[in-house]
Every structure is written in C-alpha cells, then in structure tokens.
Image: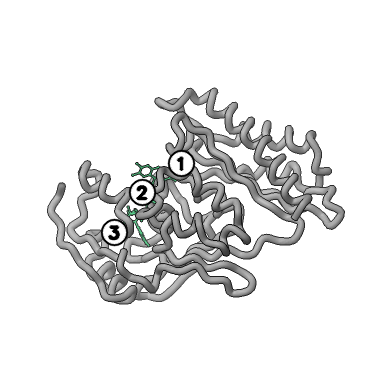
C-alpha cells in the first residue's frame, strides 16, 4: 500500500477544507468497502485519506413531505431496513436485498457506492429512475447534480476533486406510478451480469403509459438510460406489446462488452429479457398504486 497521511475531520466543513487544501491528492474514506481494495491493490495512491465515516451529521434518512433525503453516510443496511424507505421506495429495498452480503451492507454507504461509480452497482439504476439528485459540498458552496448526470465514465463521477457528496434527495413517486429492479447474477449477492430498473407512470385510468424511465446496469461504462425504449412506450397502452417493444429497444441501447460473466451477445439479450420483466412488473405495481 502506498503511504498516506490519515486525517479525521471534526465536521463536514473541515472535511471540505482538507479536500481543498490537498486537492487531487486526497481521497475520502467512508465505509472503505471499495476504497480499501483500491488502496491495497495500489490502484488508488492518495497522499491523504480523509475519513468521514464518523461524521454523524451525514448519517440520516429524513422525510420533508415531498421528498426523502438520504445522508451520504447512510449504510446500505440502514436504507434496506428503514421503515420510511420500505414504505416510500420499495424498489430501493429490492436492490439492497441482493447487494453484496449483510457484512458489506453494514459498512458500505450509499454515498460511497455512488461515488465509486461502478457501472454494475445495484442502487444507481433505481435511484436514477426515481429521479434522485446528489448534493455536493465544497469550500465554494453547495450544488445539485441530478443522478442521471452524475456518472460520467467508468468509475468516474461529475464530482470535482474537492467536492463531497453529502446527500441524495429522492422525490416522492407520482400517483399511479411504480418502480421495479432486478439483477441477474451467477452467485447470489454478487455484482450483476446485467441489471435493469424501470419506473412507469400510468394515466388516471391506469391504461396508458404517461411516463417511462428504464436504466440498464453493467452494460456500459456508466448506468445507461434506455431513452429510446422509454420514449417508444410513452403514450402507448400499457400492454404486452409495449412491454415487448421496450425490451427489444432497450436491448439495442445496451453497450455491453464480453468478459468473464458473459459474451456481449448474451448480455444484450439478457438486457432485453430483464427489461421486459421489469417494465411488466412496474406496470402491474403502478396499476395497484
Ligand atoms: C465483496 C464485495 C462485494 C460487493 N458486491 C456488491 C454488489 O453486489 N452490488 C453493489 O452495488 N456493490 C457491491 N459492492 C460494493 C459496495 O457496495 C461498495 O463498496 C460500498 O457501497 C462503497 O461504499 P463505502 O462507504 O464503503 O465507500 P468507500 O470504499 O469508503 O469509498 C468508495 C469511493 O467513493 C469515494 N467516496 C466515498 N464517500 C464519498 C463521499 N461522501 N463523497 C465523495 N466521495 C466519496 C471514496 O473516496 C472512494 O473513491 C461490493 C463490495 C465488496 C467488497
């Protein structure tokens, strides 16, 4: 491991000052579930580690009457078991249940997972379809980044080097709307071969698709928003024809590469199959919402 200076700020402002002072040379440490691996393998070689894990001010889940605010240091396990999240955003619980194992979910944080920006991460697709927004803080102040603009490349985000992700805001889901998520894995609790999240909004009669957002995980350098698939079924009757169409188009929007988990062809096909299943499930849920 490359040698580094270990810093423990007393608050988030001090953490921002540390990042600003050592810009480009410091890494944030949250739960350490990804960073420690990167340090041990020398993929990450920071001169400073700024440990924010003990900053309780970033560990919360709050309801403000129109959205739910999730502090960046909320662990996966807290999210998974939060009564508020279970009630408001069951799709996040669905994603969390199969994210790694309980030990990792006890340590790993939602903010850390998003900032690590693995294109196969489980919570990114559902948070994007839910129209989540990231709040970033630095010595220059605060700014908001919609999560559909947060991931810019393989393991790279829109955060500046001196910014800390402090909160994720998820707006209440509209009436007659619902979301669903599923991943296909080789071993339970593993990263997905392919994952799909979808949010579907129906009209008042619950017949026509008013809004559709489909996000594919693990088939590109970032989570991929299957825009054409979503647009193609918006305004259509919510039936098996729309479901089939969404899957076929989403499959063509995937950008998978062949690797140990499967060939490019297999992953593309899987993206289509999972999209059909998940869009269908989201429609069924929206009909009951
Ligand atoms: C064995 C194993 C299996 C796993 N399986 C899965 C899986 O199936 N699905 C899945 O989605 N994930 C999986 N993970 C990944 C896991 O979810 C992440 O490692 C974890 O959530 C990262 O959060 P952390 O708090 O530990 O982040 P850290 O490891 O502390 O940090 C990760 C990165 O984010 C940066 N960072 C952290 N917090 C902030 C912040 N607030 N602001 C700015 N930058 C920040 C760090 O500098 C670092 O670059 C697995 C991990 C392991 C070790």
Q: Residue furthest right?
A: 205
The quarter of the displayed image where residue 239 is located: top right
Helix, strand or loop under label 3: strand
* The disc label shown at residue 120, or none: 1
From this view, report whether residue 233 is shown above or below residue 169: above
The colour scheme used here is one colour
140 on left or right of 22:
right
Mark 3 sits near ligand 1, with its Cβ under 8 Å away: yes
Q: Is residue 225 depicted above or below 21 in this figure?
A: above
Residue 153 seen anywhere in this rendered image of the structure: yes
Task: Return the residue at label 3.
Answer: 29
The CB of the residue at mark 2 lies under 8 Å from ligand 1: no
> What residue is shown with label 2?
103
The residue located at (36%, 48%) in the rendering is 103
Of the two numbered discs 1 and 3 on the same chain, state the one appearing first in sequence: 3
Residue 186: x percent and y percent? 46, 29
Q: Nearer the viewer, mark 2 or mark 3?
A: 2
Is the residue indicated by label 1 positioned so its CB lies within 8 Å of ligand 1? yes
């Amino acid at each position: 491991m490359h040698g580094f200076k270990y810093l423990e700020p007393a608050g988030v402002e001090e953490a921002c000052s540390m990042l600003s002072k050592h810009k480009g040379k410091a890494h944030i440490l949250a739960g350490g579930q990804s960073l420690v691996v990167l340090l041990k393998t020398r993929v990450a070689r920071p001169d400073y580690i700024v440990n924010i894990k003990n900053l309780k001010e970033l560990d919360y889940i709050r309801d403000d009457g129109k959205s739910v605010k999730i502090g960046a240091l909320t662990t996966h396990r807290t999210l998974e078991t939060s009564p508020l999240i279970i009630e408001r955003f069951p799709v996040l619980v669905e994603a969390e249940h199969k994210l790694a194992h309980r030990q990792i979910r006890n340590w790993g944080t939602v903010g850390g997972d998003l900032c690590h920006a693995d294109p196969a991460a489980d919570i990114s697709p559902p948070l994007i379809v839910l129209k989540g927004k990231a709040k970033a803080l630095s010595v220059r102040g605060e700014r908001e980044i919609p999560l559909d603009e947060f991931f810019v490349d393989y393991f790279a985000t829109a955060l500046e080097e001196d910014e800390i992700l402090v909160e994720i805001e998820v707006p209440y889901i509209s009436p007659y709307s619902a979301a669903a998520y599923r991943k296909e894995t080789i071993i339970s609790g593993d990263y997905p071969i392919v994952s799909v999240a979808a949010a579907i909004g129906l009209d008042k009669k619950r017949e026509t698709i008013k809004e559709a957002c489909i996000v594919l995980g693990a088939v590109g350098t970032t989570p991929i928003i299957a825009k054409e698939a979503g647009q193609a079924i918006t305004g259509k009757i919510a039936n098996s024809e729309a479901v089939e169409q969404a899957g076929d188009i989403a499959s063509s929007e995937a950008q998978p590469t062949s690797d140990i988990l499967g060939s490019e062809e297999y992953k593309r096909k899987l993206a289509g199959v999972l999209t059909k299943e998940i869009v269908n499930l989201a429609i069924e849920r929206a009909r009951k919402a």
